[in-house]
Amino acid sequence: MSKPTLQITPSDASLDVRRRIVLDGYAAGPVQVSAELRHPDGSVWRSEATFTAGTDGRIDLDQQAPSAGDWQEADAMGVVWSMRLVQPATDAARSDEVDPQVISVHARGADGATAQAELIQRYVVDGVSRRDVNVDGIVGSVFTPAGAGPHPVIVVMNGSGGGIPLQRAAQWAAHGYTAFALGYFKAPGLPAHISGTPLEYFERALRWVRAELAPRNGFVAITGQSRGGELSLLLGARFPELIDAVIAYVPSIVVHGTLRAGRPGEAPDSPVWTWQGKPLPNVWQNNPDVDWSAFKQVPTDGQPVRQAPAFVTALRNADAVAAARIPVEQIKGPVLLISGTDDGFWPSSLYSDQIVAALRASGHRWPYRHFQGEGAGHAIGLPNEPTTQIAKPHPVAGVVLTGGGTPQANAHANTDSWQAALDFLAEASA
């Protein structure tokens, strides 16, 4: 039998490009496939699975499911999304940097014969440039696509973990958008906590985007996840003349308090957003129907906190909801909502259904869509990344929370929602 081979096609490409992985020349019987990612933040991730080679010695990972291992379906990208964390990060500050991910893939046949190959996933593709921004108090990074502009623009924001979403912005730039990764707390030169964040900061940033980034046909979209999804809708409603489309990942229809991202010792129902020096009402304040039990539970016996049930109780009080509701009907452009049906952080699918109902009732003149990741949790993001870390410490509070979902459901939601977002924005910016 010929020497076994392991072929990855393409071997080096953008993060969101699916790869084909084909093994050939193996002795009939079990074949062990393993992969390892040594992340730039110092963490190490691994996956493994066993396949059965037939008499032809060939295994196509998109055509054959493993007989055992970390993933259970015919999916070549299972080698990536099923990766388990085996060594924690040593430099967490680099976790959202845009260094290429180099994944080593190995295969060993029943007779001990081996083959290996590298899979390189790039956030920044050829031709994309990056420049960091710190002007007039506005902090972030701009990723400019290859080719002559002008390009449509998308502003990208993080959630309650803060920081600057470099990876997602870089991936939007890979698809032809000038992407501004905008920080608003827990970033250089900005406050360490989300407390009392003025909406004027975002208005100033949006006006800077329009003046400095020269969006094609004046088109500027905005996207964020979790608190950033809440914020994207809030900004779209508050500044409709500055925002042409909204993509809200696992969003909320109501304004929330600081929750776990506020200053040390601050009550979780403290104000987050302010306008003209006054705090916006949030659904938790003076709400007699709130039951904080699920939010305030302490992780025990290794079980993480699933806090979503507390958020459902806050919706029981009609007056509190009315005071805190984001007036999404004031958005003047298309809206895409992305949620997970098993969201453990807050009920993003319920919120998104309510947003759709409000848009429908108002006769919203632009397209709107709710993408629902069936069985997926809160951490819906870019495709082809490990999805096994369902529970992890909150980046500010440190409390171990479960986002919900399963690795497989979350991986499918990442892939399918990303394509939905690309299709949505291509149509909106045409």
Image: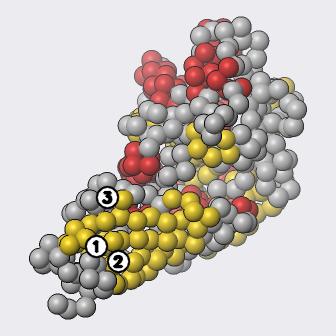
Q: Secondary structure at mark 2?
A: strand
Q: Which residue is mark 2?
A: 107
At label 1, the amino acid type is Val
Give the CA distance from mark 1 to mark 3.
11 Å
Q: Residue at x 46, y 33 (%)?
A: 342
As drawn, the residue found furthest toward the left would be 55
- Vertical comparison of 368 with 323: above or below: below
Earlier-in-chain disc, 1 versus 2: 1
Q: Amino acid at mark 3?
A: Ala
Name the residue that disc number 3 marks.
68
Task: Out of 363 and 157, give the one closest to the viewer.
Answer: 157
Q: Nearer the viewer, residue 70 or 184?
A: 70
Looking at the image, is 205 positioned above or below residue 377? Answer: below
Discs 1, 2 touching: Cβ within 8 Å:
yes
Percent x, y for residue 121? 48, 71
Q: Residue at x 86, y 56 (%)?
A: 189
Q: Tell me the crowding category of disc 1: few under 14, some 14 to 19, or many 20 or more residues within 10 angstroms, Cα based.
A: many
Name the residue at the bottom extreme: 2
The residue wearing badge 1 is 31
Q: Which of disc 2 and disc 3 is earlier in sequence?
A: 3
Q: Position of residue 149 (x, y in %)?
A: 54, 69
User: Which quadrant is home to the N terminus?
Assistant: bottom left
